[in-house]
Image: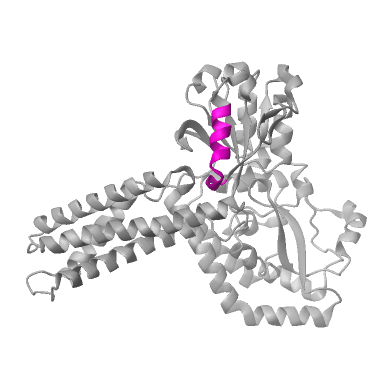
Amino acid sequence: MGILKEKSEFFQALHQVLDLFIVTIAFWLAFWLRGLHLPAKTPYAFVLILTLICYYLSLRLCAVYDSFRRQKFHQVVLKIVQATITGMLGVIFLIYFLHIPALSRLFMTFFLALSTIFLITSKAILYYTLRHSRQRDYNTRQVLIVGSRSRSRSRSIDLIKEILKNPESGYRIYGCLETSDQIKLVGTTVTRDITVTGTMEDFCDILLQKSIDEVIFAIPLKKIDNIHEYIFFAENLGINIRIMPDFQIQKIMYYPQTAKIFIDSFLGMPTMCLSSTSFKNSELKIKTMIDYIGAGAGLILLSPLMLLIALLIKLTSKGPVLFTQRRSGLNGRQFSLYKFRTMVNNAEELKSQLAQDNEMDGPVFKMKKDPRVTRLGSFLRKSSLDELPQLFNILKGEMSLVGPRPPLPEEVERYQLWQRRRLSMKPGLTCIWQVSGRNDISFDNWMKMDLDYIDNWSLLFDLKLISITVKEMLLGKGR
């Protein structure tokens, strides 16, 4: 994960705050250029508040905050011009509606010009900074394309060329798949370094083994046997599906169980998209903002406690302070999860000897009285203090405060298909399972709880889970 993350909800929240700050600067600069001195009849401070409200709504209405990834810069400029004009019209309407004494026309002209120029300048800086970061392979999305030049004539090759021509979009092509009767094309080059990596027979294995974020069907769906099974498979993994627009999904008689269907622009090309993830974009922005603020504040406030825990671990047992383990995150991306070490130093080597004592069904290993756990480690686990280093994982963008717990890659390999969809949301420190009995819950019910969280996610639900988790920690009910 890169530091610059265009899709980051936290970044977009800051983006909006920055725009309001820019509008405020433009307002007072226009005021200064006009040479006004706050005449009593015109409450410019109140007008500024109305202006900020109108501009915020107009910037949202004109879709200025849509992902830069899929837009050309001239499209962004056009949206800003539309937004500033719309915002100014809103201000004028409110001035007359509220019977506020008329503003200086020269002031309004200065303000409209300055706000437009300042906003375009700020967007240019953001746009090309993000573009540069994506060209360096930060914040990329892996795409699997179904279809190559041999079968779709120009459609898929145009799509591939458009992606390759726009590396700043952040999209990276894993490869192309062909229909099962075109196995002879496997290994052939489509264009540049993009090859046919397999046929539809390999579709499921690729989605399970690779970190694919989106699948694009660039050939008529009727050419693919059992197409509904492939779409069902990707949908259950929580992977976005795009279908080129001249293919009607009703023709394949497929009705999504969890995904929502909508038309979305992909590098200027309209596609039909199926997505199983939440559409509450505004709330998701706040969620990520809470994650970063919460993790940062937590590290600052809890640093004395964390230093004390680190010292106690060093004094009471041999080995490192932190236990680092590879885990599977969003869409199967692996990352290093941090915890305070609660077991003896060779705990992983001893795990195979305790396999028969596993108290959980499914692919996970849990024991109430694990002999590998140290005396201090037992306290840290009951109080959940061993999880505190994961605040660093949150700041790195790998985890969230609330979300399904990140599993081990070998556990994911043993998941059933429907269980894989829990990877479609960023993992978290706590979720429903953590506050509902943990090891007393069967593995299948645990998975269902995580999917229930994904399907019914809301900010209020997150805040509720955080408050319950704090209570559980204070009561020492962790394991």
Q: Residue furthest front?
A: 192
- 347 left or right of 116? right
- 357 left or right of 187? right
Q: Residue furthest right?
A: 353
The colour scheme used to paint the residues is: one colour
**In the rendered picture of this protein, how many numbered marks are placed on residues?**
0
- 168 left or right of 45? right
Would residue 271 be seen by someone viewing this image from the given angle? Answer: yes
Q: Position of residue 443 (x, y in %)?
A: 72, 47
Which residue lies at the image location 63% right of the left edge and 49% below the top edge?
A: 330
Find out whether residue 162 is within the magenta segment. Answer: yes
Q: For the stretch drawn in magenta, what is the main secondary structure?
A: helix
Would residue 286 be seen by someone viewing this image from the given angle? Answer: no
- 201 left or right of 6? right
Of 21 and 96, nearer the camera is: 21
Find out whether residue 43 is within the magenta segment. Answer: no
Of 95 and 67, nearer the camera is: 67
Establish if 400 lies above or below 70: below
Which residue lies at the image location 53% right of the left edge and 45% below the top edge?
A: 169
Which residue lies at the image location 78% right of the left edge and 42% below the top edge?
A: 414
Which residue lies at the image location 62% right of the left edge and 31% below the top edge?
A: 145
- Quadrant where the image shows the N terminus: bottom right
Establish if 285 lies above or below 296: above
- Quadrant where the image shows the C terminus: bottom right
Which contiguous range is marked in magenta?
157-170
Q: Position of residue 252 (x, y in %)?
A: 55, 18
Q: Position of residue 74 (x, y in %)?
A: 38, 45
Establish if 361 lies above or below 99: above
Q: Position of residue 102 (x, y in %)?
A: 8, 62
